[in-house]
Image (cartoon, coloured by chain):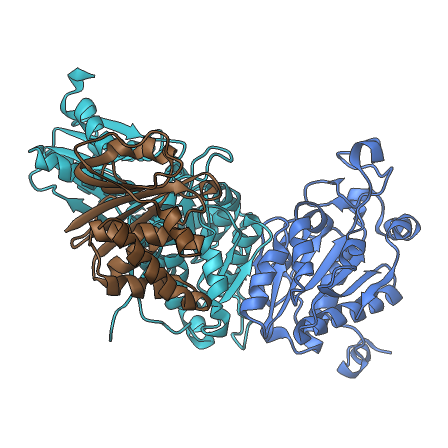
């Protein structure tokens, strides 16, 4: 079979990948820089082909609660938004996590706080990886760096989310959302039949249909010992995810004297900086976490025993650096280089920061 | 082979669509491509720019500090990008509306009066295709067959009758720099 | 008649509906919720909908409704039941999907979800218990609280200049093109109970037939919150609430 190669924006890739995955529904609300997800879905009219439901909700709040309802019935349901909209969704995400439902949430980050800017940012790292809403919970957080990964992580996110019955998030940024690249779309999968949903999700509220007992999807438990049990169960799931699902990519780390840690599209800017550095004989490596939660703590710990210093590059004031420092435990200097407000560093700036922060800090 | 291109001008001059056709043509020639716009309200009236990278190997950063080739359509963009063309690179610009022409001597500077040519073709919308023609004549990074395929991909079906006019504009652009 | 004769099955005129759980509810004695739950349980059985119903519980006194009526349930976040129901119905169009919401849930924090679900004409039924007060949290003012009514947050009575006016949400929903049936009922007398049952039956039928959004507002009592006996509450409701919230159909297509 010939590969289905297209040129498209990251946001468009999300939409096409959702249809190809056999997603059952998308609920969303327009917000720059991710509106192409909803626009592409409305343009493709998947309800005519796969039967996928696409609905523009009255708010991000309504959209995430539609996701909650759809997920409760065992369906593969998703939403997407950008930073301010994702803040609005947090209550619903907490309910989805607490009700142990699978769901996929996409955040194409823009600069904040507040209304901020529509330009790219990575300032929602804390929100995405430390819970985001109220209560003790985690999302599985995937950070795509290419348009291809925007497409691929739809399937990965849904699969992990169903496997562990916990919501997954694609944490992208305006760069990878808005840029166009080549993308190979997966073949079209059939949406699951009602029988398959019932078999895969015996907990789903589909109507009793002779089940003999009713299913209840709720996050409420007024009996504290039982609620603690629920919490312990969630934590066991998170421990299992942390054990099995860490994903990352290493570039030029074998002989690296210095290490850059960066995620998403920023990792690519850093990679270009590293190519330029290596051309000058500076041995720099890159570790790109693909899962931001669970975080590649062990891998960074191991690398911190071999390099002289680590630069963390992010489009924020220093968020992922806290997780890097926890992994490094003070063995080597860990410094930050960040741009904010929608500003994007170019490879030259990254190299300068590497020089002044890590290689020759005395020059500073 | 790797070509790093910036196209910059006002919103509405066809900057993004010119980049898109270039990127699609790259795709048709089995190249790796990235098309990275400065997005948002800038598209409407303000300055617009797009970085297009074509390469026969995987592309790392879609964001660059220097370019092999720049296509510049207004003074603001010229001020911003003239110094970011790599030594030995190419700067194509439309002299209409440029009060301070480029001064660099270590790059190839090529004025292309695309608006005048577009008026000759009796369709101002061919403006960006004339510039694309000039660019491809100077930097033949994709072949003309790929460009026609790219036009088919990027233009909506109802505008396909305009493909011959666009091809004519690309040819005219190439003549202008011969 | 001897006791044996009285309990003969053929003499039975009244019993717990099959789909109403045999457990003590957490509702206060005299609360209207119990009656409405019973009506719903009866109807789901009578209409043969036990196996293909998904109900959505609110935040408020009815938060535990899922413990009492034996069908599939989802517990929604406060006010979001119509959004949750929207997805449930669109993804499972063969099911009866209804929400069960109080006035705080539906007409305060969930106004947007209510109006937009109704405006889209989602094929759901909304059962709206309007007792003019927040019961669960201890008797605070609701948008539907009458002027002059004392609550925990209007200890000297609701004032229009401070708190605005009692919100008539059914009057907002009836003109929307998406609604097919909007009615206001009560459950304070046997006759009213029968009318409410007929109204909910119609709302459920509409949902199954895909006719649009149906809203059954049930003006109810909260004897604990109102600090009255159940009997006095019913009298007070008829005397005061019905003037602001008149009984009957606002829309019936």
When the figure is inspected, residue A135 is found, relative to residue A363, above or below; the finding is below
Chain B display color: brown
> Which one is nearer the viewer's eye here, A168 or A164?
A168
Q: Quadrant of the C terminus of chain C?
A: bottom right
When the figure is inspected, residue B40 is found, relative to residue A204, above or below; the finding is above
Q: Which residue is at a point 8% across and 33% down the rendered structure image?
A: A280
Residue A160, position in %: x, y? 34, 58
> Which one is nearer the viewer's eye here, A173 or C165?
A173
* Extreme residue toward the bottom, this view: C10
Q: Is residue A201 visible?
A: yes
Q: Residue A263 is drawn in which quadrant?
A: top left
Is residue A24 shown left or right of residue A305?
Answer: right
* Extreme residue toward the front, this view: B120
> Which one is nearer the viewer's eye here, C216 or A32?
A32
Chain C display color: blue
Chain A display color: cyan
């Amino acid at each position: 079979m010939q590969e289905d190669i297209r040129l498209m924006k990251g946001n468009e890739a999300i939409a096409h990948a959702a249809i190809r995955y056999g997603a059952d529904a998308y609920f969303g609300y327009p917000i720059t820089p991710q509106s192409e997800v909803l626009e592409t879905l409305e343009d493709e009219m998947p309800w005519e082909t796969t039967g996928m439901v696409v609905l523009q909700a009255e708010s991000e709040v309504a959209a995430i609660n539609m996701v909650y309802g759809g997920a409760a019935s065992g369906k593969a349901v998703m939403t997407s938004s950008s930073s301010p909209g994702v803040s609005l969704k947090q209550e619903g995400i907490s309910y989805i996590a607490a009700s142990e439902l699978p769901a996929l949430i996409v955040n194409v980050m823009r600069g904040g706080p507040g209304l901020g800017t529509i330009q790219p940012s990575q300032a929602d790292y804390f929100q995405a990886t430390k819970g985001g809403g109220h209560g003790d919970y985690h999302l599985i957080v995937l950070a795509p760096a290419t348009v291809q990964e925007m497409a691929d992580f739809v399937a990965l996110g849904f699969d992990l989310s169903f496997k562990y019955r916990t919501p997954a998030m694609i944490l992208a940024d305006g760069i990878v959302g808005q840029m166009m690249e080549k993308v190979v779309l997966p073949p079209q999968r059939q949406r699951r039949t009602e029988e398959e949903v019932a078999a895969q999700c015996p907990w789903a509220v589909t109507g009793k249909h002779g089940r003999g007992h009713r299913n209840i999807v709720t996050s409420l438990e007024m009996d504290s010992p039982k609620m603690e049990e629920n919490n312990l169960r969630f934590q066991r799931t998170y421990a299992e995810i942390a054990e099995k699902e860490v994903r990352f990519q290493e570039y030029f780390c074998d002989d690296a004297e210095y290490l850059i840690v960066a995620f998403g599209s920023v990792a690519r800017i850093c990679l270009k900086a590293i190519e330029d550095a290596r051309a000058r004989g500076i041995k720099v490596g890159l570790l790109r976490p693909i899962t931001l939660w669970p975080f590649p703590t062990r891998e960074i710990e191991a690398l911190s025993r071999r390099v002289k210093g680590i630069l963390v590059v992010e489009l924020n004031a220093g968020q992922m650096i806290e997780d890097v420092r926890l992994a490094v435990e003070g063995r080597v200097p860990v410094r930050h280089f960040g741009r904010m407000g929608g500003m994007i560093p170019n490879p030259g700036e990254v190299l300068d920061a590497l020089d002044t922060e890590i290689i020759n800090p005395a020059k500073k | 082979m790797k070509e790093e291109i910036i196209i910059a001008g006002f919103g509405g001059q066809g900057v993004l669509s010119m980049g898109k056709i270039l990127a699609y043509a790259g795709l048709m020639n089995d190249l790796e491509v990235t098309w990275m716009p400065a997005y948002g309200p800038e598209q409407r009236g303000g300055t617009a720019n797009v970085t297009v990278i074509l390469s026969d190997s995987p592309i790392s950063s879609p964001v660059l500090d220097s370019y092999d080739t720049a296509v510049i359509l207004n003074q603001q963009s010229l001020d911003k990008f003239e110094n970011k063309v790599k030594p030995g690179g190419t700067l194509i610009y439309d002299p209409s509306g440029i009060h301070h022409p480029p001064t660099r001597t270590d790059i190839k500077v090529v004025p292309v009066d695309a608006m005048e040519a577009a008026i000759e073709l009796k369709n101002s919308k061919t403006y960006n295709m004339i510039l694309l023609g000039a660019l491809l004549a100077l930097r033949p990074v994709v072949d003309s067959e790929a460009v026609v395929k790219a036009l088919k991909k990027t233009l909506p079906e109802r505008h396909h009758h305009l493909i011959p006019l666009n091809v004519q504009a690309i040819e005219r652009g190439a003549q202008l720099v011969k | 008649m001897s006791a044996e004769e009285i309990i003969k099955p053929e003499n039975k005129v009244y019993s717990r509906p099959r789909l109403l759980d045999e457990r003590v509810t957490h509702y206060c004695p005299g609360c209207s919720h119990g009656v409405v739950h019973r009506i719903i349980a009866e109807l789901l059985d009578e209409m043969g909908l036990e196996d293909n119903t998904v109900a959505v519980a609110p935040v408020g006194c009815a938060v535990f409704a899922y413990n009492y009526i034996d069908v599939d349930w989802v517990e929604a976040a406060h006010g979001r039941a119509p959004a949750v129901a929207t997805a449930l119905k669109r993804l499972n169009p063969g099911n009866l999907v209804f929400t069960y919401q109080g006035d705080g849930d539906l007409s305060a924090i969930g106004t947007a979800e209510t109006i937009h679900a109704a405006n889209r004409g989602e094929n759901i039924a909304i059962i709206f218990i309007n007792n003019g007060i927040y019961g669960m949290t201890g008797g605070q003012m609701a948008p539907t609280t009458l002027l002059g009514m004392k609550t925990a947050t209007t200890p000297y009575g609701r004032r229009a200049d401070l708190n605005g006016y009692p919100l008539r949400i059914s009057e907002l929903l009836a003109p929307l093109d998406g609604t097919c049936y909007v009615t206001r009922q009560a459950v304070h007398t046997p006759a009213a109970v029968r009318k409410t049952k007929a109204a909910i039956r119609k709302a459920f039928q509409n949902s199954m037939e895909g006719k649009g959004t149906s809203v059954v507002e049930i003006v109810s009592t909260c004897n604990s919150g109102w600090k009255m006996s159940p009997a006095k509450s019913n009298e007070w409701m008829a005397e005061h609430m019905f003037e602001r919230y008149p009984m009957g159909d606002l829309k019936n297509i």
